[in-house]
Image (cartoon, rainbow, N blue to C red):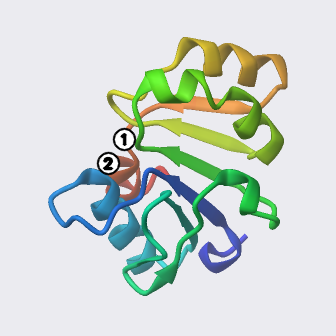
Amino acid sequence: MSNIEHHVVVLGATPKPGRFAHQAVLLLKKHEYKITPVHPRFEEIEGISAVKYLSEINDPVQTLTLYVGASKLDNMVDEVLDLNPQRVIFNPGTESRALQKALSGKNIQWVEDCTLVMLNSGTF
């Protein structure tokens, strides 16, 4: 699968340049991945149309990368399961045991890692 066919959803994407979620969008864009940023307050991030909720995404998702706190994720378990991504990346600070347990129960691969490091090291 080429990068352009690999759909990456960035939950917690932001246009704020100093944030890791913003850096992830920039790096994914540089590597030519298909990106869907998700944030309830922004319509566009780095020229890419954003959605407010995971439920607005209809295309299959290969990777969901998380940039929201574990407390918010604990309340989003059903939404993430409904999205049915092939893989979920828990970036530092996003580790939700409830979500990880639910993903394991549905045989959805998940890792605790850093999207930026993975992209820069060729392990994404």
Tell me how far mark 1 sits from mark 2, CA to CA: 5 Å
Residue situated in front as seen by the camera: 76 or 64: 76
Residue 16 in percent (x, y) is at 22, 64
> Residue at 63% of width from left, 54% of height from top?
53
The image quarter in which residue 23 lies: bottom left
User: Residue beneath label 1, please?
Assistant: 114
> Residue at 81% of width from left, 61% of height from top?
60
The image quarter in which residue 113 lies: top left
Residue 82 in percent (x, y) is at 82, 41
Q: Is 20 situated above or below 8? A: above
Q: Residues within 10 Å of mark 1 (few under 14, many from 20)?
A: some
Residue situated in front as seen by the camera: 32 or 106: 106
Q: Amino acid at mark 2?
A: Val
The circle drawn on residue 117 is: 2
Residue 45 is left or right of residue 23, and the answer is right
The image quarter in which residue 21 lies: bottom left
Q: Residues within 10 Å of mark 2 (few under 14, many from 20)?
A: few
Residue 18 is left or right of residue 42, and the answer is left
Residue 115 in percent (x, y) is at 40, 49
Kindly give the residue lying farthest to the left in the view shown. Answer: 18
- The N terminus is located in which quarter? bottom right
> Residue at 22% of width from left, 54% of height from top?
19
Q: Is 34 situated above or below 106? A: below
Residue 85 is left or right of residue 112, and the answer is right
Tags 1 and 2 in contact by the CB under 8 Å rule?
yes
Residue 58 is left or right of residue 38, and the answer is right
> Residue at 32% of width from left, 48% of height from top?
117
SS of the residue under disc 2: helix
The circle drawn on residue 72 is: none
Q: Is 8 situated above or below 111? A: below
Q: Amino acid at mark 1?
A: Cys
Residue situated in front as seen by the camera: 46 or 1: 46
